[in-house]
Amino acid sequence: MDAIELLTTRQSDSNLSFPGPSTEQLEVIKKAALKVPDHGGLTPWQFIVVHEQARDKLGEIYHQAAVEEQQGERTISRAKSLPQRAPMIIIAISPYKEHPKVPRIEQIQSAACSVLAMQQAAFAQRLSGVWRTGYYAQSPKVKSLLGLNEQDEIIGYLYLGTPTVDCTKPVRHKPETFFKEL
């Protein structure tokens, strides 16, 4: 797959199954994550790879946070099963580093670029993925249970695996709708 095809055909797929990324594929995904814009060379990213066996542990973290933070019954009842939606999950984190020229938002944006780069690297290798956020990316308890600091941001959870259906999504957006000239 060439770069233009990748950039213009990438899509998110939430129906993922085994196999997840192989060791070799994961190395490519990791390398892609570290080639994103990084103002000041701060490397404002950190990643936790949740392999097949560790998904149960992540489910327990979700469940404990949902119970302790008194989320609704639906959130609590689904918590343990959510990490089972893909064979691998990469948790992307932006650990904030005080800097006079690189504001917090730029550090978060850099980490967000790393998630897109990882998803594109997976897609280029005939895998797929979906970037999830929501309650578990915002929960102070989840951050604590993952060993993060209060000021760290969970950018999201990149679920990776093999797509279960070959379903190319239709083009939804036309460039002229979003671009104008000054």
Image (spheres, helix red, strand yellow):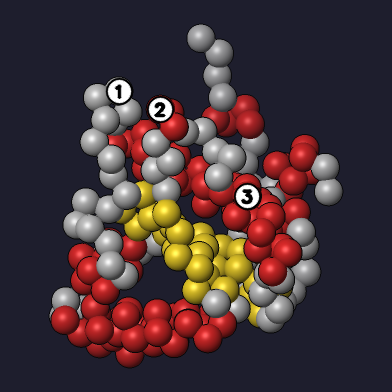
Q: Which mark is residue 31?
A: 3
Say which quarter of the image contains residue 2: top right
Label whose residue precedes the other's in the sequence (3 or 2): 3
Which SS class for mark 2? Answer: helix
Say what amino acid the circle numbered 2 marks: Gly
Say what amino acid the circle numbered 1 marks: Lys
> Label 2: how many residues lie within 10 Å, few (<14), some (14-19) or many (20+)?
few
**Residue underneath mark 2:** 40
Which SS class for mark 1? Answer: loop
Which SS class for mark 3? Answer: helix
- Using residue 139 as the reference point, say whether residue 162 is left or right of it: right
Q: Position of residue 41 (x, y in %)?
A: 44, 32
Q: Position of residue 32 (x, y in %)?
A: 62, 47
Q: Are marks 2 and 1 in contact (CB under 8 Å)?
A: yes
Question: What's the residue at 32%, 36% (across, down)?
Answer: 105
Q: Position of residue 182 (x, y in %)?
A: 51, 9
